[in-house]
């Protein structure tokens, strides 16, 4: 999906003036990594309605206003629709759909594919509903990005912002107990 940098700059400026102090602190930390090109992992854990999605939208607009590529993903289709250009993580990263995940699962992205080219260009990934994401899926994406981008750094050196609320839903584990869901979480 193409975004008009001028329009994105307008969105960024309009929203920037509305950010709370806490949102500004996160915005500054993430954009510092983006400007430095240093990668970086950021984790946003806050209760429902505190403005996580609002902040993700500003971060996406920041990158897109620079004419650069930012991907927005979420664990569910519904949450993905709330992010501009959002898609499910499974669709974007071609994460294998399995009932039993393994440490060796790989994303179905060929080195010469269009998606691999997107992964080589991407500067920012925002991943919403991270509390519902199975950690093995996140690990598959980490392996895929390191491989495609030929950089042995977390997520191949892409700046990643995970956002979620562990007071809400945890990953679904088929026939699993609550303990299994907790074990499947990105954060235990
Ligand atoms: N700084 C802000 N200025 C104005 N409105 C804001 C700001 N931050 C958030 N909002 C508004 O507050 C409401 C809730 O914000 P948002 O949906 O981003 O929360 P959330 O933390 O993502 O919630 P959930 O965890 O349920 O997805 C939205 O209507 C959003 O537009």
Image (tube, helix red, strand yellow):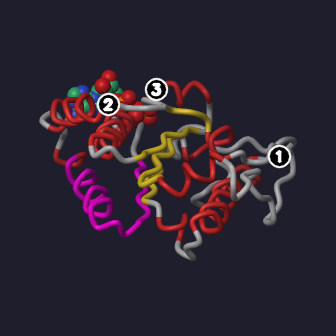
Mark closest to the chain's N terminus, 2 or 1 = 2
Quarter of the figure with residue 106: bottom right
Q: Is residue 150 magenta?
A: no
118 or 22, nearer to the observer: 118
Mark closest to the chain's N terminus, 2 or 3 = 2
- What residue does disc 3 label? 82
Q: Is residue 56 visible?
A: yes
Look at the numbered disc 3 and give the secondary structure of its residue: loop
- What residue does disc 2 label? 4
Res. 121 mark: none
- Disc 1 residue crowd, few under 14, some 14–19, many 20+, Cα 10 Å: few
- What residue does disc 1 label? 176
Residue located at (51% from left, 45% from top): 127
Q: Is residue 14 left or right of residue 91?
A: left
User: Residue 17's spot in the image, x, y percent?
Assistant: 12, 36
Look at the numbered disc 2 and give the secondary structure of its residue: loop
Q: Is residue 49 visible?
A: no
- Nearest-to-viewer mark from 2 and 1: 2
Q: Is residue 31 above or below residue 49?
A: below
Residue located at (47% from left, 52% from top): 122
Q: Are marks 2 and 3 in contact (CB under 8 Å)?
A: no
Mark closest to the chain's N terminus, 3 or 1 = 3
Q: Please tell me in which quarter of the rendered image ligand 1 is found.
A: top left
Q: Is residue 36 magenta?
A: yes
42 or 150, nearer to the observer: 150
User: Residue 27's spot in the image, x, y percent?
Assistant: 26, 51
């Amino acid at each position: 999906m193409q975004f008009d940098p001028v329009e994105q700059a307008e969105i960024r400026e309009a929203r920037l003036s509305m950010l709370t102090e806490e949102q500004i602190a996160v915005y500054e930390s993430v954009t510092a990594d983006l400007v430095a090109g240093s990668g970086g992992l950021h984790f946003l854990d806050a209760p429902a309605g505190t403005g996580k999605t609002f902040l993700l939208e500003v971060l996406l607009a920041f990158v897109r206003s620079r004419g650069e590529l930012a991907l927005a993903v979420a664990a569910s289709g519904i949450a993905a629709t709330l992010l501009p250009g959002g898609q499910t993580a499974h669709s974007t990263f071609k994460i294998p759909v399995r009932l039993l995940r393994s440490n060796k699962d790989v994303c179905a992205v060929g080195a010469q594919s269009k998606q691999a080219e997107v992964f080589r260009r991407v500067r920012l990934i925002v991943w919403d509903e991270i509390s519902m994401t199975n950690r093995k899926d996140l690990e598959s994406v980490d392996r895929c990005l390191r491989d495609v981008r030929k950089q042995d750094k977390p997520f191949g050196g892409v700046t990643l912002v995970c956002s979620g609320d562990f007071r809400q839903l945890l990953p679904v584990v088929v026939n699993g107990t609550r303990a299994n869901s907790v074990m499947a979480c990105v954060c235990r």
